[in-house]
Amino acid sequence: MPDAAVAARSSEATNSDTTQQVDVAVVGAGFAGLYLLHRLRKTGFTAVVIEEAGDVGGTWYWNRYPGARCDIQTIDYSYTFDPELESAWQWSEKYATQPEILRYLGFVADRYELRRDIRFGTKVTAAHWDEAAERWRLTTSNGADISCHYYIMATGCLSAPKPPEIDGVKDFKGEVYFTGRWPHEEVKLAGKRIAVIGTGSSGIQSIPLFAEQAAHLTVFQRTPNFALPAHNGPAPADRLALLQGDRAGYREQARWSLAGVPYPQQMAVSWQLSDAERRERFEQAWAAGDLVHILTQLWADQGVDVDGNALLADLIREKIREIVKDPETAEALTPRDHPFGAKRPCLDTNYYATFNRPNVTLVNLRQEPITSITASGITTDKRTFDVDMIVFATGFDAMTGAIKAVHPITGRDGKSLSDVWANGPQTYLGLTVSGFPNLFLVTGPGSPSVLSNMAVSIEQHVDWVVDRLASLREAGFTTIDATETAQAGWAQHMADCSTLTLHRLANTWYTGANVPGKAQGVMPYTGGVGPYRSICNEVVARGMLGFKLTGPNVSEQCNDGQVVRLQPDVRLVLGMLAEMNLPAIESLGAQGARDFLTEFNKGRPAGRPVGEVGDGVLHGADGLLPYRLYRPATPGPHPIVVYFHGGGWVLGDEQSDDPFCRDICRRSGMIVVSVGYRHAPEHRFPAAAEDGYAATRWIAEHATELGGRAGPVLVAGWSAGANIAAVTCQLARDRGGPEIAGQLLVCPATDCRFDRPSYTDNAVGYFLTRALMFWFWDIYCSPADRTDPRASPLRGNLANLPPAFVATCEFDPLRDEGIEYAEAMAAAGVPVEQLQARGNIHSSLMMVDVVITGVSGRARMAEALRSFAGLPRKLEESGESASAIAVNAAAG
């Protein structure tokens, strides 16, 4: 529909002094606003959409700059709520241009007759919550004000352009344009001297087209970005076949995927692949021209590990050097200040090749910053450029700017949203804000939004919100407000999620770093589209957890709490285990359980390389025991850590905790000797305890033969292995050696009692169960022997023991006895450092390269071991391993 006709209809509909009364008011008529209006109507709500623009389209109405396209394939960047709509519209290209996307949104508006309830050319100039009436009062710039029961912001994440930060813009006599507010009429480029400031997505898309027409193009770049070839054309046949073969299944996979596009979770890690294998995968991805593919499908650690990411980034840097002929220009275009993917990479068409053109100049603002804009051009601290046109491709005040810039929003008790968000956005689920009843955000900060396929996230948001409104209406509730507890819990979960990725290592609009003075923090939800959907569903299943609901004729409901208490990757692991429907280990018998563990461990990522791994045998308490030795790559001799595996004194062997042993070896720079002790029921108590002591004594006596440092050794263990390590320290003290410099106890079993709260709180649901611990104890030790300190070290003499590091996990039946053991040692005068791992389960800290949030805990363990051995606490202080330093720094 022509803008003029739309404006006329808008004026006729709203030119009234009376307040417009509706159930729901929506701001924004883009992807989100249109679907909201459609769903609200179908659910029986009266609604109005307020839109500043002259027609539908949202971001795609304003972003009309040359080269503007989506960067998600259009078969995925589409509505999926109506199969008939999908059949009625066919995209012409893999990545549609802005005009085609705008036509698509216009087609949707026409198909469902949406424009009649949209007020175009209108802004909301003020909004406040009327507590007495339980309604939002909206003042508008055009036509009647609005009174609504529910108020929904569908303003988009990238719709508030960031103003230029350069002096003299108003003095320039030539043409000035902003990519985010490109004119609707044709802009003549041919033969002009054009300057483009900014090389983000809009700059990278438009620069090649400007260069084709300009007499000369000067590109001013402050920060280079990674760009990947789009290889645009028809929709890829393989993806199209997947969609057409099972459209419903394809869409459902997208909804539960991590990025909103149905790709499987990549399992191969970078260090498992050869250089040739990694290069082959990369070349295939580079040729495919698929942003989601190259961000997620090369190797599993590319987005979470600095070393794995650097392998991919270096391959892209090679491509830049191959394409750009001038080495100095190529280097200036090469990103080196952030991991690949930490800023949104761009899809381009001939971007790097454009800088080979004779009419294109790149100005590196890191070397010569702009000092001013004059009447005739741009001046840096080294030279002046006379230009006819300046194009600002300087991006947006993302995520929050679009919401805060629309108007002042005033909630309960006169609170301003701008004030509440002064130190960064606070939301619950990215959908609501505590203290602002009946206000909802679509793809707001705290939701997957810009880290996802926005079309999928928008539909999920809209469906969740509208379904909640319908449920509230049915139950008689008239207000809904997030609790402060739930909101604070979501902020903690957001912070936990951010430790999984490398986004926090870049200054980007994801974190607000592109806007001077803006509070910085990772604003989008980094935990993935599917996990986010499951959390939203869980909130509902748990009785609207985290919300206070009120109504005039019903009792108030406030189900306060924190929806996610587990670390995000631990939650994913438990979800996958639940889907596997594994048998209860205690039901398998001892040998069946051992066979199960062997098969289960085959599916975990291989441990990272160390200098050397070797196997041998040593003398235990009653015969030979196997061991596996992990040696650092650095020159020795090294201190030795004697390690005992977990498994309830029944399961496991010297290899079963292999990734953890490798990790400790790498991080500590020490030799780790993992001992395979005797197991129950064949060898009941005290066989394991005595083997632990005998093995430690033998290793200490043979330290130099093993390549280790003579003198005190250290002991470490997990679970039942930590029990053995603790017992070994007591026996070594009482039996005259060997000398032990320190003990690392990870989730230790220290006492035979089952009446501590952690056994009740964490009885089921966290892999290690109360029932399984009963089974372990029954097999290992008779009730009459369980109070022996060799079984329950908490009951022994704790004085004069080696210094200890004790790690416990929040959701672990053994949590309380581990904490009690640490506190009892400290009370006996033993130096003790504790790690109480919030949001973790019994096996979390052992799941190297699966539970990434455990990295900081493992780093602390390694530091403690080094301290016990008299070495600098941090490995980098001794200059031993740059690789380990990088991983530690990246993962916290």
Image (tube, rainbow, N blue to C red):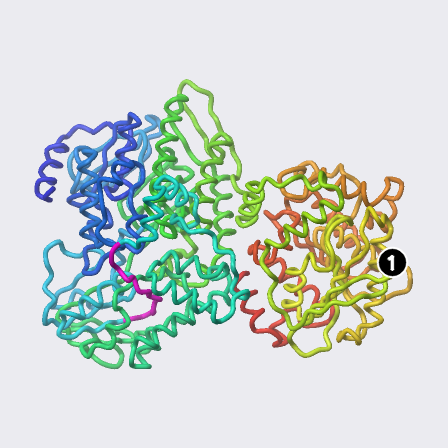
Q: Quadrant of the C terminus?
A: bottom right
Q: Which quadrant of the figure has residue 477? A: top left
The vertical placement of 138 against 75, above or below, is above
Residue 37 position, x and y percent, is 26, 34
Question: Quick check: is 225 in the magenta stretch?
Answer: yes
Left or right: 352 with respect to 472? Answer: left
Residue 8 position, x and y percent, is 9, 38
Name the outermost residue toward the top. 553
Q: Which quadrant of the figure has residue 358? A: bottom left
The vertical placement of 84 against 162, above or below, is above
Residue 525 position, x and y percent, is 43, 49
Viewer-side residue, 317 vs 371: 317
Q: Residue at x 44, y 36 (%)?
A: 482
Q: Main secondary structure of the magenta part?
A: loop
The vertical placement of 778 against 632, above or below, is above
Residue 634 position, x and y percent, is 65, 77
Left or right: 317 with respect to 695? Answer: left
The residue that label 1 is drawn on is 731
Q: Which quadrant of the figure has residue 876? A: bottom right
Residue span colored magenta:
221-234
Q: Amino acid at mark 1?
A: Leu
